[in-house]
Image (cartoon, rainbow, N blue to C red):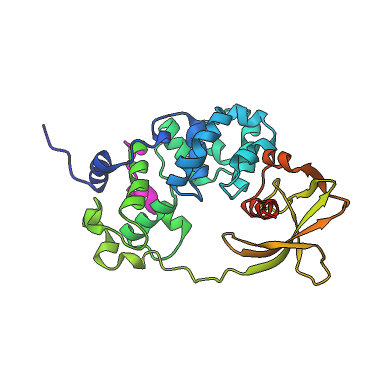
């Protein structure tokens, strides 16, 4: 039999057969919902965190996309609690309702759904339906930047590179392999070039892999100093439902600029770091009814979706 010609794709697939993360649960299913859920959970979160704390509990609560569609948004946000980037959960709920719990089978129809971008649509298409398209997550981007020697963060150029390297005969294995290669070998700060199945033709290895892509200009993250107000009336606590894009739909305590005029009992300080800014806050307890707040028994807060910062505020109150 004629031996298989060695190509970057065959070298990559051989490496993946030996080294790939084959036991990941979303790789042992062709269920579009489970694949979709894993993709959006992994967009801003590490694999270990998703596996240990979020993926299985979410599926236990919502075993199908139809269950997500039929649930109130509050329940979906509560189950997402702690995972952060809550826009993902709101988009998941919106999409589940828009498609009536059944994801479409074409790339074009997937992209038309809220919160499903091109790479996520391609991932669902390749992994659930076997469509020959590449994906472009953070790990794959890094591999492509280095392999082709692409310095600029040009989206159009990266997609062209992704299609140029794609193994159209094995889109499932190829895309999984590219993600694993970026996560395990072509890592950000200390790439293991000698272990890479693509090293023979990699431009980055021959020069300086850390130069690809060109580093982003560093931006300092501002810190907002706030008063974090726990209003209490007849044993109940007053909360507001967030309307800002970052935490829309979640419940939380009142935030206000720090002002000497603000009264109340000082309970302590808490802080939290978001992706683009931080919050440092004084927690103050104020007794009295305030119009415009929703009032809850402390025990009832367990059923509400709160941000990590608001959980810290609640813990500060409970520790008094």
Q: Residue at x 61, y 64 (%)?
A: 278
Q: Residue at x 75, y 69 (%)?
A: 258
Q: Nearer the viewer, residue 89 or 272?
A: 272
Q: Nearer the viewer, residue 133 or 23?
A: 23
Q: Quadrant of the C terminus?
A: bottom right
Residue 149 shown left or right of residue 111 in the figure: left
Residue 161 shown left or right of residue 45 in the figure: left
Extreme residue toward the left, this view:
1
237 in magenta: no
Is there any visible trace of residue 114 in the rendered image? Answer: no
Residue 52 % position (x, y):
46, 41
Residue 229 % position (x, y):
76, 58
Residue 238 % position (x, y):
80, 49
Q: Nearer the viewer, residue 298 or 255?
A: 298
Residue 64 sits above or below residue 175 on the image: above
Residues shaded magenta: 161-171
165 in magenta: yes
């Amino acid at each position: 039999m004629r031996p298989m010609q060695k190509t970057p794709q065959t070298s990559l697939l051989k490496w993946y057969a030996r080294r790939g993360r084959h036991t990941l649960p979303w790789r042992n299913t062709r269920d579009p919902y489970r694949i979709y859920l894993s993709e959006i959970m992994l967009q801003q979160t590490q694999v270990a965190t998703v596996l240990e704390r979020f993926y299985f509990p979410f599926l236990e609560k919502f075993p199908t996309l139809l269950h997500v569609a039929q649930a109130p948004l509050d329940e979906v946000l509560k189950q997402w609690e702690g995972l952060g980037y809550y826009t993902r959960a709101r988009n998941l709920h919106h999409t589940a309702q828009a498609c009536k719990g059944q994801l479409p089978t074409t790339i074009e129809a997937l992209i038309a759904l809220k919160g499903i971008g091109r790479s996520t649509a391609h991932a669902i298409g390749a992994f659930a339906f076997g469509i020959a398209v590449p994906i472009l997550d953070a790990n794959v981007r890094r591999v492509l930047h280095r392999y082709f020697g692409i310095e600029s963060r040009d989206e159009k150029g990266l997609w062209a590179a992704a299609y140029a390297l794609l193994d159209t005969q094995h889109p499932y294995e190829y895309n999984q392999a590219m993600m694993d290669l970026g996560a395990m070998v072509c890592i950000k700060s200390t790439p293991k070039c000698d272990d890479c199945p693509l090293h023979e033709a990699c431009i980055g290895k021959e020069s300086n892999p850390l130069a690809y892509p060109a580093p982003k200009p560093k931006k300092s993250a501002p810190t907002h100093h706030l008063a974090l107000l726990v209003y209490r009336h007849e044993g109940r606590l007053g909360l507001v439902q967030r309307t800002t894009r970052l935490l829309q739909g979640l419940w939380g305590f009142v935030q206000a600029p720090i002002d000497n005029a603000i009264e109340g009992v000082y309970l302590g300080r808490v802080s939290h770091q978001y992706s683009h800014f931080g919050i440092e806050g004084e927690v103050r307890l104020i007794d009295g009814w305030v119009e415009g707040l929703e009032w809850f028994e402390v025990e009832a807060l367990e059923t509400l979706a709160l941000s990590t910062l608001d959980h810290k505020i609640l813990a500060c109150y409970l520790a008094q």
